[in-house]
Amino acid sequence: MTNERNFVIGDIHSHYKEMMELLETVKFDFDSDTLISLGDLVDRGPNPIEVIETLMKIKKFTHVLGNHDEWCYQYLLNDNLSKEWLSQGGQSTLNAYNVNPEYKIDHRLFFEKAKLYFIDHKNRLFVHGGFNHRIPFELQLDNKELLIWDRSLVLTAMEYEQYNQTFTEFMEIFVGHTPTQFIKEDIPQKFSNLWMLDTGVYISGKLTIMNIETKEFWQSKSRKNEFL
């Protein structure tokens, strides 16, 4: 018999203190518990290196690639300093690596292992942005742009909720990327069989972790952010 628990965490955005607060609150076991990240580990916050170094110590960690992760990876891979990246919170990450360049190689290898999506043994999908619900998911597996950037899936889920419809390909879907502040909320939101887990830590100070099985969730205490 195992005491393993399965957790999913929303967009961390370099908020190390908030992440550690949550891991301590749930008494996360780095050896036996599972953690799935919905992406965007870096940018907009003060401690990207500490976030990654900590997650690398979790034995059962799954990293679903976010758009900010992709920007950071391209920088670590070939020094690509995208203006779009730097203008959307990437400057704090760049600053951190400029001060601590010794982490760049290991972190590049870490980002290389990220998945565009993850489907668990209960047919639950974990993806950063979304996908095109009008065509089979299996036809979109390599569409990085769609999987990390899409927001239309959330809008479809809201529509489905009104008509008591569900996404039939998966038992449940967990997404990040679209902060719940877009609908004036700061706690996880469920529409149809889709969960929104990005509670906008860089906006509200509230990072969210959820027990995937029980749907119990915990949030960090709100803090003022100076790294938008």
Image (cartoon, grey):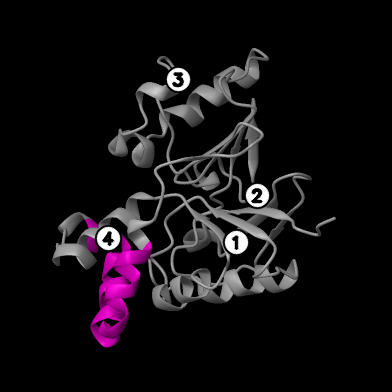
55 displayed left or right of 216? left
Q: Is residue 139 visible?
A: yes
Residue 49 lies, in percent from the top left, at 40, 76
- The disc, 2 or 4, on the residue closer to the chain's N-terminal end is 4
Q: At numbered mark 2, what does the secondary structure look like: helix, strand or loop?
A: loop
Kind of residue indicated by mark 2: Ile
Residue at the disc numbered 1 = 206
Name the amino acid type tagged 4. Answer: Tyr
Q: What's the residue at 53%, 50% (across, down)?
A: 198
Kindly report the secondary structure that dominates the magenta region of the rendered protein: helix
Q: What element carries label 1?
A: loop
- Separation of disc 1 and disc 3 at Cα? 29 Å
Q: How crowded is mark 2: few (under 14 residues within 10 Å), some or many (20 or more)?
A: many
Query: Does the residue at mark 3 contact the one at mark 2 (Cβ under 8 Å)?
Result: no
Residue receiving disc 4: 73
Residue that numbered label 2 is attached to? 187
Is residue 166 or residue 136 the one in the foreground?
Answer: 136
Type of amino acid at the residue the image marks with label 3: His
